[in-house]
Amino acid sequence: MTTPVTIRIQSADFDIAAEIAALTRGNTDIGAVVSFSGICRGGEGDQAIAAMTLEHYPGMAEAEIGRHVSEAIARWPLTGVTVIHRYGRVVPGDNIVLVLTASVHREAAFRAAEFLMDYLKTNAPFWKSEERADSKVWVDAQAHDDNAAARWKK
């Protein structure tokens, strides 16, 4: 049986409950759904963020995410996967990304969700800039994100 997969890159917000319902509808083999939602934060102190703009390379981003979803399905017994990533301008409190992984048992769902988020934070073809009170800066890769992703290398 083929694992149902949904991958969307969109400017519009998404409804987490509706996405979980769509993933699980009619599938009685699912015993666990793990969800991760990434939200635009406001930053701290002089690093306060007024907004963030996310850019991507259309077509390439979907293909790359699909490649990593396929790897997750090969590694863990998943019964469904949804990945939604927004692009465009978002403000603090807005949803940015949603990863849903479903499996018969929770361990596979947790590990696959973590694997996919580590990939999205480090290697997915998205570029982020932050608007601050006095500047607009591109967001650099973070060493702690790279370290988290390194544990999945075969």
Image (spheres, rainbow, N blue to C red):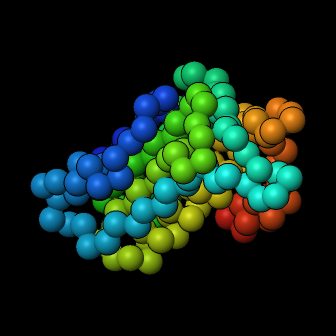
- Residue 54 seen in render: yes
State left or right for residue 95 relative to residue 100.
Answer: right
State left or right for residue 33 relative to residue 12.
Answer: left
Which residue occupies the foreground of this view, 69 or 10? 10
Residue 78: image location, x then y, percent: 37, 61
Q: In the rendered image, which quarter contains the C terminus?
A: bottom right
Q: Where 95 falls versus 44 (above or below)?
A: above
Q: Where 153 falls versus 23 (above or below)?
A: below
Residue 37: image location, x then y, percent: 49, 56
Which residue occupies the foreground of this view, 84 or 28? 84
The residue at 55%/23% (across/down) is 59
State left or right for residue 14 relative to residue 43.
Answer: left
Which residue occupies the foreground of this view, 80 or 139? 139
- Residue 70 seen in render: no
The residue at 52%/45% (across/down) is 94
Residue furthest to the top: 58
Q: Where 112 falls versus 50 (above or below)?
A: below
Q: Quadrant of residue 151?
A: bottom right
The residue at 66%/28% (across/down) is 55
Q: Where 46 falls versus 129 (above or below)?
A: below
Residue 127: image location, x then y, percent: 72, 34
Which residue occupies the foreground of this view, 137 or 106? 137
Q: Quadrant of residue 139?
A: top right
